[in-house]
Image: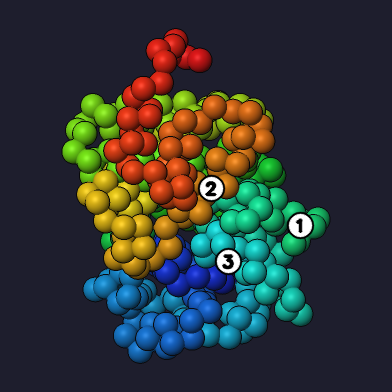
Amino acid sequence: MQNRSRTVISVLGAGSWGTALAMLLARNGITVRLWDRDSSHIEALEKSRANERYLPGIPLPDGITPVADLDKALSGSDFVLVVVPSAGFRDALKKISALPETPAKLIWASKGLEPGTGKFLHQVVEEEMPGHPAYAALSGPSFALEVARGLPTAVTVASPVAAYADTVAELFHCPTFRAYTSNDLLGVELGGSVKNVLAIAAGISDGLGYGANARAALITRGLAEIMRLGARLGGQRETFMGLAGVGDLVLTCTDDLSRNRRLGLALGQGKALAQAVESIGQAIEGLETAKELDALAARHQVDMPITAQVKAVLYDNAPPSSAVQALLNREAKAELL
């Protein structure tokens, strides 16, 4: 077991999720440097010792040092944990790679496909940091606010190198945060991406007042979409039935702490997309992922009707009620097809 008290981790991204994970690591006795590209946000963290913008009222543990300079944040770190929106993931890697001293061990807790390319984040890592010796993704059913409050949570840490997955899981593991490991990096990333799109669908259905039966159907058939695409791409069925699959899907589709679900609720209640996005005020990963996921499914000839209808609502001006009706009007077929 590694000595966590001698470990230094740089967390890039001081939003709600990055801050919550920084808090968890600091409570585990790890020295944490918390960086964000918004220097005024870092200044506010230093002054108030709390992330009042995203996690108000929860003090930062003593082990966290907010740092505005990326070079200083990374200097002498053992690990770098990237927790930025998927749209900024490649840029974060470029910034890391450009520095004279780069931590050899990489972790990310970002979710989604890269906007514009539809690539998985591990593919972005392979392009920007070719031959990187150690990398892993953390995913699963986990709201930042509950992690920050120390409420019980379980996640999956995925890496192609089993020993590294074990190492990373050990960093996060504690009595209130259970970290399981997996070698199915693609499957874990896919589950963490698709669930956001499906949460928008569930929110739309609830916003329209269609009830619990419809929500349960969307979640179940949404899981079928994840598994169909996952099988085509080489993911493991067990992954989609686990924390990073059905676990994250159920959480994100059923609780209003989910920004993606709240976006769907607003759309179902008749709000314009721009108004709904502005009211949420944080990154909504499913918004960009819906378009990339629909294109990915088309390239691989995988039927994903819920994803297609969410994309139609977000990008093709389809009325939410018409999108749901289009799903209901599909011809009857065997459930397992």
Say what secondary structure mark 1 lies in: helix
On screen, 75 above or below 166?
A: below
Type of amino acid at the residue the image marks with label 1 = Glu
Q: Quadrant of residue 60?
A: bottom left
Q: Return the residue nearer the eye: 10 or 6.
A: 10
**Which residue: 47% across, 44% down?**
311
Say what secondary structure mark 3 lies in: helix
Q: Tell me the tag on residue 64.
A: none
**Which residue: 51% across, 54% down?**
288
Horizontal and vertical percent position of residue 93? 67, 67
Q: Which residue is mark 2?
A: 291
Callout 1: few (<14), some (14-19), or many (20+) C-alpha neighbours within 10 Å?
Answer: few
Type of amino acid at the residue the image marks with label 3 = Gly
Horizontal and vertical percent position of residue 170? 53, 52
Q: Earlier in the sequence, mark 2 or mark 3?
A: 3
On screen, 27 above or below 213?
A: below
**Which residue: 43% across, 34% down?**
306
Q: Which residue is mark 3?
A: 88
| Cα distance in 3D space between marks 2 and 3 | 17 Å
Q: Is residue 173 visible?
A: no
Q: Which residue is mark 1?
A: 127
| Cα distance in 3D space between marks 3 and 1 | 15 Å
